[in-house]
Amino acid sequence: QVQPVESGGGLVQTGDSLRLSCAVSGHTFSSFVMGWFRQAPGKEREFVAAISRTTYVADSVKARFTISRDNAKNTVYLQMNSLKPEDTAVYYCAARISAGLGLTVRDYHYWGQGTQVTVSS
C-alpha cells in the first residue's frame, strides 16, 4: 500500500517561507516519481513540481519554490519562499509509479489528503 501523507502547512504572512513534507509508505519510494499539486477554492487542481532523478517546477512558482527528496527517509519536500496570497491552496503530494515526470493530475496513481497553506496579506 502506497500512502503519501503531507505535513507542514499552516497560516503565514506574505513573504514568509514554508516547507511542506510528504512521507510515503512502501519499500520502493526511490523508484517513484513524486509530485506536488495545489488546489485553490473554486479552481482546478494544478501542477506545482515533480521530481524523479530530475526536477521540474511550474513556471508560475519556479523562482520561489524548490522540490527535493530524501530517499533514505521516504520523504519529498516542497520549499516555498516569498509566499504570496495567491499561493493559498490545499497542497497535495502524489506518487507516480510509471516512468517519466508527470505534469497532470491523471499522471499520478496515489494521492495524499492534502495540507492547507494560507498566506495572509
Image: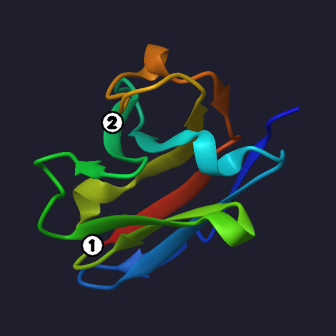
- Expressed as whole percent of the image width and height from the top left, the position of residue 2 reads 80, 36
* Pick the front one: 76 or 93: 76
Label 1 and label 2: CA atoms lie apart by: 17 Å
Choose top left, top right, bottom left or bottom right for residue 26.
top right
* Pick the front one: 50 or 82: 50
| Kind of residue at badge 1 | Leu
- Expressed as whole percent of the image width and height from the top left, the position of residue 112 reads 69, 40
Q: Residue at x 83, y 49 (%)?
A: 25
Farthest-out residue, top: 106
Q: Secondary structure at mark 1?
A: loop
Q: Secondary structure at mark 2?
A: strand
Query: Which residue, given by chain and number where applicable, does mark 2 sit on?
Result: 47
82 in relation to 113, above or below: below
* Pick the front one: 17 or 103: 103
Q: Residue at x 60, y 42 (%)?
A: 31
- Expressed as whole percent of the image width and height from the top left, the position of residue 104 reads 36, 22
Left or right for 35, reference 3: left
- Expressed as whole percent of the image width and height from the top left, the position of residue 36 reads 45, 46
Classed neighbour count for the residue bearing mark 2: other residues with Cα under 10 Å, few (<14), some (14–19), many (≥20): some
43 in relation to 12, above or below: above
Q: Quadrant of the C terminus?
A: bottom left
Q: Residue at x 43, y 47 (%)?
A: 52
Query: Which residue, given by chain and number where applicable, does mark 1 sit on?
Result: 83
Q: Nearer the N terminus, badge 1 or badge 2? A: 2
Q: How many marks?
A: 2
